[in-house]
Amino acid sequence: MKDLEEIIKNCCMVSGVDITSKNRKRDTFVYGRACYYLIAKKLKEYRYIQKVGKEVLVQKYTDSFISEYLGWNHASGINARQKIGYDYFKDKIFVEMLDKVNELCGYMTEDKSDEPRYTESQVQKLRDQITELLKKNRDNERLIDGFTNSTNGFLLEINQLPEEQRNEFRDFKWRPHKRMLESRIKN
């Protein structure tokens, strides 16, 4: 929730008002809250989804949580985000405000061109992530090489068989052998 606090703080700073107050002045309060709702709704995180069986990128916070965190009901957040799409982006004041808040929060700002704009902190964060992924990739390659050498390519040969033959091997050779080994352990 530190990310929501940071977004609120930056929205207040850019708009020059406390966006948590119940004021409806368009150029400050309403636009400041709209920036908050839009940015908070775009926050994503990886979560393990049991039904899918893997980690998936999902929305970090619900509409209700985003709105209630600011002290409003969920309908206010939904309404603000809907107006952004067809109303607020026509106003230069709102677009500039949103860009400033995005930049202060370290998020990529939206640009009308096809080229995304990144802040220096975003570029550094991406470099760090790339370095970490390359390291993990090298570690995984070492594991695979070690595994391949230790099995003398046996598993690779099985994996290269057509699917029907792999299934036959699994059902009539591997599973019976596995059951036999398990029964030895029990006795």
Image (tube, rainbow, N blue to C red):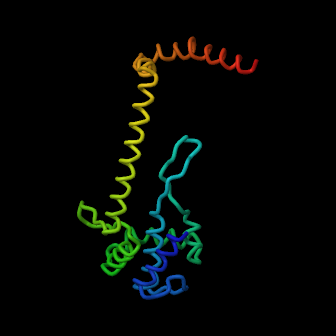
- Considering the image in quadrants, where does the N terminus appear? bottom right
- Please state if 69 lies on the left or on the right of 93 as rendered: right
- Please state if 68 lies on the left or on the right of 158 as rendered: right
Give x and y (percent) for residue 56: 49, 48
- x 55%, y 65%: residue: 63
Give x and y (percent) for residue 10: 44, 79
Please name whichever residue, 69 or 182, is drawn nearer the observer in this view of the structure.
182
Give x and y (percent) for residue 37: 48, 71
Give x and y (percent) for residue 48: 55, 48
- x 54%, y 63%: residue: 61
Please name whichever residue, 134 or 101, is drawn nearer the observer in this view of the structure.
134
- Considering the image in quadrants, where does the C terminus appear? top right
- x 52%, y 43%: residue: 54
Q: How many marks?
A: 0
- x 40%, y 36%: residue: 142
Task: Answer above or below: position of 159 versus 98.
Answer: above
Q: Residue 127 sits in which quadrant?
A: bottom left
Task: Answer above or below: position of 183 versus 1.
Answer: above
Please name whichever residue, 178 or 171, is drawn nearer the observer in this view of the structure.
178
Please name whichever residue, 100 or 149, is drawn nearer the observer in this view of the structure.
149
- Please state if 31 lies on the left or on the right of 69 as rendered: left
Task: Answer above or below: position of 130 versus 101.
Answer: above
